[in-house]
Amino acid sequence: MNVFASVGRATLDLLREIGRLSIFTADAVTSFVRPPIYWSLVGKQIMRIGYFSLPVVGLTAFFTGAVLALQIYIGTARYGAEQFVPTVVLIGILRELGPVIAGLMVAGRVAAAIAAELGTMRVTEQIDALTTLATRPIKYLVVPRLMAALISMPILVAIADAIGVMGGYVAATESLDFTGSIYLNTTMAALSNNDIASGLYKAVVFGFLIALMGCYNGFNSKGGAQGVGAATTNAVVSASILILVANYILTNIFNLLGI
Amino acid sequence: MESAASVTADAKIVIKGVKKRFGPKVVLDGLDLVVPRGQSLVIIGGSGTGKSVTIKCVLGILKPDAGQILVDGQDTAKLRGNARDAYLRKFGMLFQGAALFDSMTVWENVAFGLIQGRGVKRATAREIAFEKLAKVGLAADVGALYPSELSGGMQKRVGLARAIAAEPEIIFFDEPTTGLDPIMSDIINNLIVETRGSGTTTLSITHDLVSARKIADRIAMLYKGKIIWEGPTAEIDRSGNPYVEQFIHGRAEGPIKMEVKA
């Protein structure tokens, strides 16, 4: 087996995949601005992507905030700096953990669901059937999901932020010796618009990546049940990785811009 | 083979030298075919000879690597945006597995092309949907069911009702009788002949010869990405073509070798 041939083939496959994804993305984004927009479908997807993700996002945010408070206490207490716990919890949740935890949970729930649904529609020819009924599949299936994710994610993250900070408060007052009013006052004093905004900007990007990966993998699934399974796995894995990579890049950009 | 030029004048669909390959696998290798206006042409051929790919190329779901497809004299490769939407409104299609939308009820499936594709009001589209369901022999109470609650034969009927709902100029039938028992096959064949109406051009693909003889005005045989025989249905038994002979008599021995290795 020629090593160069296999390296070359892998490289070509990668480039082909990137090209395909770019065309798909461009197609989806340009369809955004052209009528018709199926608003009732956008509403339905907001329910599925946003509203029904609330319990799982809320629960994970609560316990993340709580455990964050406990860990930061261990770190700061060594230097007698326990009074910084509320501030660090607040910044950690708003800037990083709120959007990332919500993003990963929604990636697991929603990217998988979208990929499985569209993948099944693909292999049973339902997507081709849309075309024969004079309906553009990208407009009818992809745009509503992308739009719903773009709208839902910032709202979900805002709620996750509030619940996460509350988790920190509960842990600090129940397990540690913080006084509730002091904890809350410190939190409120540390609250800054930039911290909130940077998390919400991230949420918009994550929402886009989640819906895009779900739609792209579903749209391109092949074969039967196995193909749909592979598409679902790929959607969740690629969405999760892209969220973490995008998070790093965005944090760098925000640092540079001073947000 | 009859000269294609003589029918081009009144051709609805003209396929010229279309080539399509997937990776190293050549599926269509210079396909030439003319579907005359208002006639029913059936493409026969073994599994994996590129029958479905042909239809998907005409619809623009797949882009041919080479060649030209003309519908009403219009080159389909150049269509974009609204022109493409208008183009697609000419077609209706019955899919092999019916391809009904499982998230919608039966009547919503039938009305879909009217509501989404053509902007017909929901109430009007609903009336038309029930009228078409009656036409394919389904009672009104079926309209409220979901596709998963129906048998294969009933799904095919709903798929047929959906394909004809908007009274398209061209209807494609992809393996209309595959997977159905002989009686249900005959019922579907009759429905296809009845519901076609006059003036509709149809292109079907099948490997069921009973079905082909019943619904076709003309038959074309596809083999290795090319049309190897084309003529009126009545002449299929005297084609003098060894490939066609082997196929219509279903012989294992003959010029067609089944490619067992993919």
Image (tube, coloured by chain):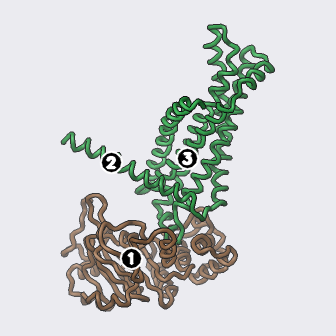
Chain colours: A green, B brown
Instruction: Spot the residue most to the front.
Output: A257
10 Å crowding of disc 3: few (<14), some (14-19), many (20+)? many
Residue A208 tag number = 3
Q: Which residue is mark 2?
A: A13
For the residue labelled by badge 2, is the local secondary structure a helix, a strand or a loop?
A: helix
Instruction: Spot the residue most to the top.
Output: A79
Q: CA distance from mark 3 to mark 1?
A: 36 Å
Q: Residue at x 48, y 48 (%)?
A: A232
Front: mark 2 or 3: 3
Q: Chain of mark 2?
A: A
**Left or right placement of residue B214 versus residue B244 in this view:** right
Quarter holding residue B140:
bottom right
Q: Which residue is mark 1?
A: B75
Residue B218 tag number = none
10 Å crowding of disc 1: few (<14), some (14-19), many (20+)? few
**Left or right placement of residue A127 versus residue A187 in this view:** left
Q: CA distance from mark 2 to mark 3?
A: 24 Å
**Left or right placement of residue A4 versus residue A104 in this view:** left
10 Å crowding of disc 2: few (<14), some (14-19), many (20+)? few
Give the answer, above or below, for where B198 lies relative to B149: below
Quarter holding residue B128:
bottom right
For the residue labelled by badge 3, is the local secondary structure a helix, a strand or a loop?
A: helix
Q: Position of residue A244 (x, y in %)?
A: 51, 35
Q: Position of residue A27 (x, y in %)?
A: 48, 57
Q: Chain of mark 1?
A: B
Quarter holding residue B257:
bottom left
- Asked if marks 3 and 1 fall on the same chain, the answer is no
Q: CA distance from mark 1 to mark 2?
A: 32 Å
Amino acid at the residue labelled 2: Asp
Give the answer, above or below, for where A54 lies relative to A182: below
